[in-house]
Image (cartoon, coloured by chain):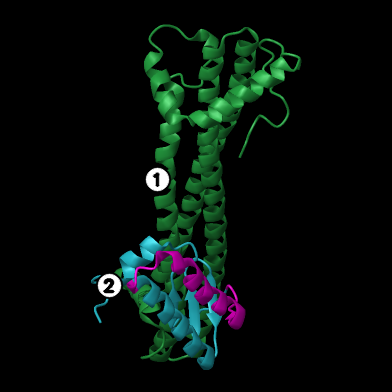
Chain colours: A green, B cyan
Amino acid sequence: MAGLGGRMSTVVKAKVSKLLDRAEDPAETLDYSYQKQVEQLQNVKKGIADVVTAKKRLQMQENSLQQSVVKLDTQARQALAAGKEDLARTALERKNVAQTELQGLDTQVAELEDQQQKLTDSEQKLRAKIEAFRTKKEVIKAQYSAAEAQVRISEAATGVGEQMADVGLAMQRAVDKTENMRARADAVQELEAAGTFDDITQLGPGEDDIDRQLKELSSQPAVDDELAKMKSELGSGAPAPQIASGEAPAGEGKQA
Amino acid sequence: MIVRISGEGQYRLSDADGERLNALEGAVVTVINEGRGEDFPAAFGAVLDFVREHGEELADDALDASQVILPPADATYDEARHEFTGEGLIPD
């Protein structure tokens, strides 16, 4: 095989070979080998379930943040209509932070969808190969001498082993990504726990620290723009939204 | 020759296409060695596209081993640089 494949694929292939070597000789005992394959398939299923769980968690956070965006937008309008510009600015800063987090979550949910799809495809391929291997080993055992059967089954097992190694690498990537995302999910949860997206009309003393951090987190030009826009809407005689209606104007719920 | 794209599948390529693949792959390694991260996605994408376009995808239940295994399509420049430069896994 010398000369085939450049350095890049050689390195990846070496990695896969290493994984294959680490496993028991897949052809050593046929039934044991098949049992290992089925176990690996169970692991893949569990890996997919973990990705789905992580995705659901992010989606729940998305829902919660979307509601916060709507609520804070409404409260900003109410505050402005009541002439409380400072309060309106605070609400818009929080809305801005919530929207930024939402965009980050959107990207991550999409990435997890992608991981889930890839793992599902890999699982399907692995399942097909295991099934083919199972059939083939019976045929080979019946048709060939013990020594020859061993060689042929070993070849077939290598094909399955390579797919197992590949699924293993894909699962590791999924786990790494899921862990990165957990960090973001935790950050959002901290913001929520700190009352960042709470009802601003409930603000009491001692919230100054949160507000100072929010000012740093939020995009002030975007907040200025939105405040100006809201003011002009109110000034031009647009009807003020009903207090505590919880409804935002169309299109304001989520700006991805 | 049989080429696997990690996390995607296996493809059968003619020997002539295998050589063209080798050249495309060499271009990726050059990009990495010269630290041109901005050129990595296009160069790496060209390798994968070549395999997908010129290769015949193997059936799910095929039991063939691959001669060449490529990194997954979502491999980043940083990952590639980390793996293919410096000491690497296989010293030249």
Question: Left of A10 or right of it: where is A68?
Answer: right
Where does the magenta region start and end? B33-60
In the image, residue B25 lies at what x, y percent?
44, 79
Q: Residue at (51%, 24%) from the top-left corner?
A: A93
Q: Distance between the residues labelled 2 and 1?
A: 25 Å
In the image, residue A19 lies at what x, y percent?
34, 69
In the image, residue A153 lies at what x, y percent?
44, 82
Q: Quadrant of the N terminus of chain A?
A: bottom left
Q: Can residue B16 be seen in this view?
A: yes
User: For mark 2, what is the residue?
Assistant: B89
Task: Check the residue under mark 1 and report the chain it is in.
Answer: A
Label 1: few (<14), some or many (≥20) within 10 Å?
A: few
Question: Left of A67 or right of it: where is A200?
Answer: left
Q: Do labels 2 and 1 share a chain?
A: no
Label 2: few (<14), some or many (≥20) within 10 Å?
A: some
Q: For numbered disc 2, what is the local secondary structure?
A: loop
Task: Check the residue under mark 2 and report the chain it is in.
Answer: B
User: For mark 1, what is the residue?
Assistant: A179
Residue B6 lies in magenta, yes or no? no
Which residue is nearer to you in this view: A201 or B4? A201
